[in-house]
Amino acid sequence: MSLSGNLIVSGTKVSPEHYRGRFAPSPTGPLHLGSMFTAVASYLQAKSKQGRWLLRIDDVDTPRVSSGASDSIMRTLELFALHWDEDVFMQSQGTDAYNKALSRLDEDGWIYPCSCSRKDLASSNGLETVRMVYPGTCRKVNRSRHQPHALRVITHDALVSVDDKLQGHHRWDVEREFGDFIVFRRDKIVSYHLATVIDDWRSGITEVVRGVDLLDSVPIQMYLQSLLGLPNHDYLHLPVLVDRKGIKLSKQNLAEAVSHRDPSSTLFKILLLLNQSPPADIKRTPPGEILAWAIQAWDVSKLSGLDCINEAGEDSCVPASRKIVDGNSY
Ligand SMILES: [Zn+2]
């Protein structure tokens, strides 16, 4: 398999006339305001295009899964009238497809075992706080597959570019900025990137709507799509919600679970934060009615170029730092 030149652009697109979007939370805890913000935006984006909105539970990273979180996520979405259109897809049930993709990459000569420890890499890289660029140590050495190892993908000088619906044009040099990245972890868990690419493809997703902190996943995921001969889809990276200190609301930062007490007023607040200017009189109507208003009024361009929104509704916010999903996690 070869890449056309060294430039990968959005190539074959999945059929855009049948919009299919998804919300793909990790079941590491209950939904918080930041994850609801993404859920509502991806729902409105799909429904305003008469599309389908799917729910996928990204539970492949089993050590991080919190018991009861999947049920809690589904209960919250239903309470907010965010009804998904097809059966919920649990990533943990999809491992055959990940194994097939890994075999294909292996047969085509794109992957190799890496037995470097995180410590080895930190000392070769110097800085643990920035995105780790794998120096390619094991690419040239034929490591034994009998020892504990991860599997990495060869990234020659591929350039990936994307026109994101909200964040504009971005371009990355995969080898220089990321290095050979991991697709199968030392603990025998498929990487977030490979699982995402396979599942977006098999669900026929036409546009991925998610937080801008995942923008740097685009080059890795598009590179994998290219190696596997899968079509690309569109991207829309939303601003992330931050608190007064500019810190992203997240489970790691102990953001509070979204309250079940008054879903209508929470939904109203989310629409305000999404810059959709909902009329005050819908605040006391049921969630389904609020969403019906929001679908017809939805204008995603009101979020253009924003990478963060202050949850307190204040004017300013510190730009969100991007999540380091660098394909180097063991
Ligand atoms: Zn290595």
Image (spheres, helix red, strand yellow):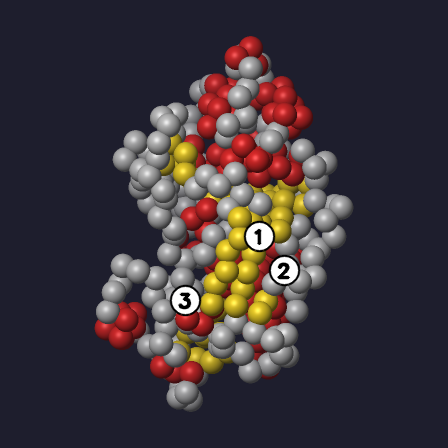
Please give the residue where the numbered disc 3 appears in the rendered image: 177
C-alpha span from label 2 to label 1: 9 Å
Which one is in front in this view, the residue at disc 3 or the one at disc 1? 1
Judged left or right of residue 83, residue 14 is: right
- Labelled pair 2, 1 in contact (Cβ < 8 Å): yes
Residue placed at 35% from the left, 35% from the top? Answer: 317
Q: Would residue 210 be seen by someone viewing this image from the given angle?
A: no
C-alpha span from label 3 to label 1: 19 Å
Relative to 329, say whether 105 is above or below. Answer: below
As drawn, the residue found furthest toward the top would be 281
Residue closer to the observer: 88 or 167: 167
Mark sitting earlier along the chain (3/1): 1
Mark 1: amino acid: Asp
Mark 3: amino acid: Glu
Please give the residue where the numbered disc 1 appears in the rendered image: 163
Assign a secondary structure to mark 3. Answer: helix
Specify the quadrant of the image occupied by residue 86.
top right
- In the picture, the disc for residue 10 is 2
Judged left or right of residue 3, residue 220 is: left
